[in-house]
Amino acid sequence: MRILSWFYLALIFGFIFLPVVVLVLFSFQDSRLPIPPFDGPTLKWYVNVIGDRDLMAALANSLIVSLISAAVALTLGFLAAQGLSRIHLPGSVAMRGLMIAPMTVSYLIIALGLLNVFNSIGIRPSLWTTGIGHVVINLPLCFAIIFAAMGDHQKNAERAARDLGASDMHVMFLVTAPMLMPALLAAYFLSVTFSWDEFIIAYLLTRFDVTLPVEIWSMLRSGLSPATNAIGSLVFLVSVALLFLLEFTVFRKQKT
Amino acid sequence: MTANVSFHSVQQHFGNFVALENINLEIEAGEFLVLLGPSGCGKSTLLFILGGFLTPTNGQVLIAGSDMAGVPPKSRPTTTMFQDYALFPHMSLRDNVAFGLRMKGQNKKTRNLKADEMLDLVGLADKANHKPHELSGGQRQRIALARALAVDPEVLLLDEPLGALDMKLRRQMQEELKAIQRKVGTTFVHVTHDQEEAMAIADRIVVMNHGKIEDVGSPEDIYLKPNSLFSANFMGEMNIVPMTVKKGKVVLPFDSISAENIPENPQLCLRPENVGLTGEFELGPATLESSAFFGTYHRCHFRPLAIPEIELVAHLPLGEVPEVSAEVRLFGSNPVLLSA
């Protein structure tokens, strides 16, 4: 039984990580095609990729879009959660449902809708429109995470703060936000990763300045190369770094 | 700082439910007042109205003579110690206690000085840099008290603050609360459903039921001379002895008591400790049906021979208990006549 369960564990991890391992491994391939047999290692593809100005511009664009759109989604999601948890209006349940609804719609549909809207009001596709699209997909996520983290003990602490003379702003910055910090950080980092990886919306809503996934897509159209593996590995590295940051800041704190 | 409080015809309705019927109450400056009653009697509602968390449907609330209508909690000279303490988990104890002063715009040095003074008052000066989760229930409770008192409120509101503590700690905290109240002189308004707690700490007890005030008085008065049957029963066990009234006298099968101000439809009430083998008037012969040892007294069930349909509960001193099924003459003292 014990051996079987270890075997099962290994199988699951193999299934999940084999593609990544292959990707990373063949980014060190010496020859021009990232297929077996492996004949590396070499770092020339990384040098190649880092020296590619378009690619590096796309990487910077991706960083800007993901960091800013996540911050906007977080702020809006936090305010929405705060409002809907505190004030009971007729239809607040329906409003909550409506806030989360975009999560169930595919990114392609959201991208098409946004494309139509921007076209009809005469806004050209750009990094701005992509950023707006990423806010649309990440806001429900931020709202759901933060709303779920709000509880009675926090409401009581807010009431106590108000009783001690705190204004609404003070309550929000000194009590509510610090008490929700784990949820806020989780929501922010998840939003950053989702925006960082997002392709469809970015593909349809950018034109000259593109984000990294779109740039990788255009590289892939000219065929497989260890260079795409190298850039993929770099993207993966960023995601892993974010994940570790999340693990060490947020979840570590929650345990104590 | 301290102030008096007045409630003038305060009413609170929640839809069709009447939480407070018509409350008129004067609280003196520096008084330790306890609002006592079963859950749902309106005692917490009254406290929340005083704190400004609820706006009464009707009536007026005055603190130190000024009308509190439309004054939000933060602008009132009150602070509240909440049932669940509501400490700020991300702040050190010093920052928790200093929070109210920070909101008043005091600089860090001044407010920390005051916070340390308050921490000292509640005996937790050595834990100033700890976080709330490192404390026990009783310690958290003390921090909540220190935080509420740090802003020098005129009236401190306490919403069942000892409810979550175990018996022994609760008794200890009651004494501490009382001692701290004497020291700071602030008016304390304390809500509880525990009549022993009320008696242990109150200068004056207000007994409430169904949104009305049943009784107001010192613990002694409420216990020994209650104003209503509800208040009498809520403060502790009562024997109700059948009797008749003749010519302004209460007539019992074996004795009669002269009494003044006999209420309508009167009932004779006797506390178990006022029933015994000696006393002011005779209750007649009775047989002991059972007795149990309670440490400082024996709790005995007697059946009077003249009125076998009732049972009298008596608390007899140690060493005075007859054999079970023995016949004795019972006496009573400190009778209370209450309208049924």
Image (cartoon, coloured by chain):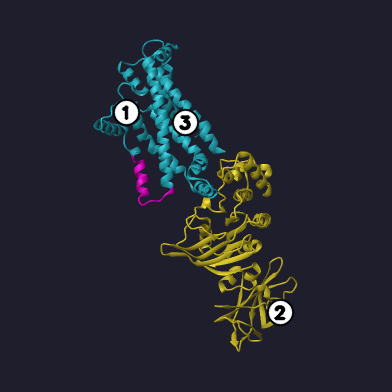
Chain colours: A cyan, B yellow
Residues at marks 2 and 3 touching, judged by CB atoms closer than 8 Å: no
Task: Nearest to the eye among marks 2 and 3: give it.
Answer: 2
Determine the residue located farthest toward the right in the rendered image: B319
x and y percentages locating residue B105 in the rendered image: 57, 42
Q: Give, as a single range, the part of the protein colored magenta.
A: A86-101
Q: Where is residue A63 drawn, in percent x and y?
A: 41, 25
Q: Is residue A86 visible?
A: yes
Q: Position of residue B186 (x, y in %)?
A: 63, 56
Q: Secondary structure at mark 2?
A: loop
The residue positioned farthest toward the left in the image shown:
A120
Instruction: Tell me which chain the residue with mark 1 is part of.
Output: A
Q: Which residue is mark 2?
A: B279
Q: Main secondary structure of the magenta part?
A: helix
Q: Which mark is residue A9?
A: 3
Distance from disc 2 to disc 1, alpha carbons, whole Å, reads 94 Å
**Mark 1 on the same chain as mark 3:** yes
